[in-house]
Amino acid sequence: MRLSVAIDGPAGAGKSTIAKIIGKNFNLMYINTGAMYRAVTVLAIRNNINYSDIEKLCTLVDSLEIHFEKDKIIVNNEDLSDKINMPEISNQVSNYAAVLEVRERLVKLQRKMSEKYDVVMDGRDIGTVVLKDAAFKFYLTASPENRATRRFKEFIDKGIDVKYEKILRDIIERDYIDSHRKVNPLTKAEDAIEIDSSNMTIEEVVAFITNCIKKDIYEALD
Ligand code: DC
């Protein structure tokens, strides 16, 4: 059986940073499922397809070959890694991610990836839907203010001029949409271990997850 680690949680909790490190440490392929929803959003907007146009959206998603190469997302041979993080994509992605038909297709792809590789996958519905049988499930949270501060610093470090209040508002709005949508809303899986990273460093979170995985592996070997 393949090893899979699921990391869910709201935007800005540090999932991707943590998942990348866990992937390297345990030799797992890192699958950033948020990047997949973002890539669909990039291509839908490029092709003038609104999130309410389900038929066109389905045709678009069915025409996509998506894979990850060294943390880059490649879609139909195009590297979309930079485009997916543009502010206009962040503002629209929740709407596209709420479409049942889009989710069904991406969930199918994600499961296929987990059958082919040992994976660490981060997202919103990994422990509850995509990899219900994952050996390890974590739910990573932090307060909205804390997450907004981290995002704010990331933008400032990149020289991008942003307002903290706007980032905080966007995070609260995205939390609301992600956790109130009808299909696969953001919730903690019953068997997931919750980690509130508000007062933890990245190293502390990585150490905690690493210990959980190692402890289980050693117990299984005993
Ligand atoms: O993690 P992120 O900010 O890159 O996610 C982008 C959007 O996609 C966000 O609105 C939540 C949504 N998403 C989802 O619905 N299910 C996932 N498994 C991953 C992301």
Image (cartoon, helix red, strand yellow):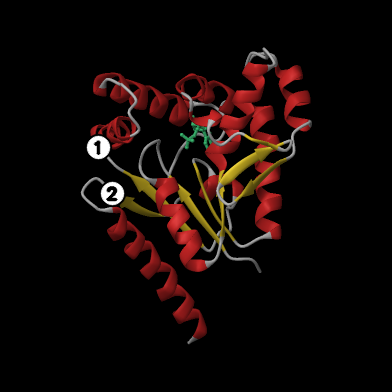
Q: How many marks?
A: 2
Task: Please tell me which residue lies in front, 118 or 141.
Answer: 118
Q: Residue furthest left?
A: 199
Q: Which mark is residue 197?
A: 2
Q: Does residue 190 appear left or right of residue 109 in this picture?
A: left
Image position, residue 45 (x, y; %)? 62, 17
User: Is there a contact, CB below 8 Å, between mark 1 and mark 2?
Assistant: yes
For badge 1, the amino acid type reads: Asn
Q: Is residue 78 placed above or below 41 in the rendered structure?
A: below
Are there few (<14), some (14-19), or many (20+) residues within 10 Å of tag 2?
Answer: some
Residue behind label 1 places its C-beta within 8 angstroms of ligand 1: no
Q: Residue at x 67, y 12 (%)?
A: 48
Q: If the image is split into quadrants, where does the N terminus sit?
A: bottom right
For badge 2, the amino acid type reads: Ser
Image position, residue 3 (x, y; %)? 58, 65
Q: Residue at x 41, y 26 (%)?
A: 174
Give the labeled residue for mark 1.
146
Q: Residue furthest bottom?
A: 222
Image position, residue 88 (x, y; %)? 49, 19
Q: Residue at x 26, y 53 (%)?
A: 201
Q: Name which quarter of the figure residue 151 lies in.
A: top left
Task: Please tell me which residue lies in front, 178 or 71.
Answer: 71
Q: Residue at x 61, y 41 (%)?
A: 73
Image position, residue 81 (x, y; %)? 56, 37
Q: Does residue 67 appear left or right of residue 11 in this picture?
A: right
**CA separation in Å, label 1 and label 2:** 9 Å
Are there few (<14), some (14-19), or many (20+) residues within 10 Å of tag 1?
Answer: some
Res. 191 visible in picture: no
Task: Please tell me which residue lies in front, 10 or 88.
Answer: 88
Which tag, 1 or 2, sits closer to the chain's start? 1
Q: Does residue 154 appear left or right of residue 137 in this picture?
A: left
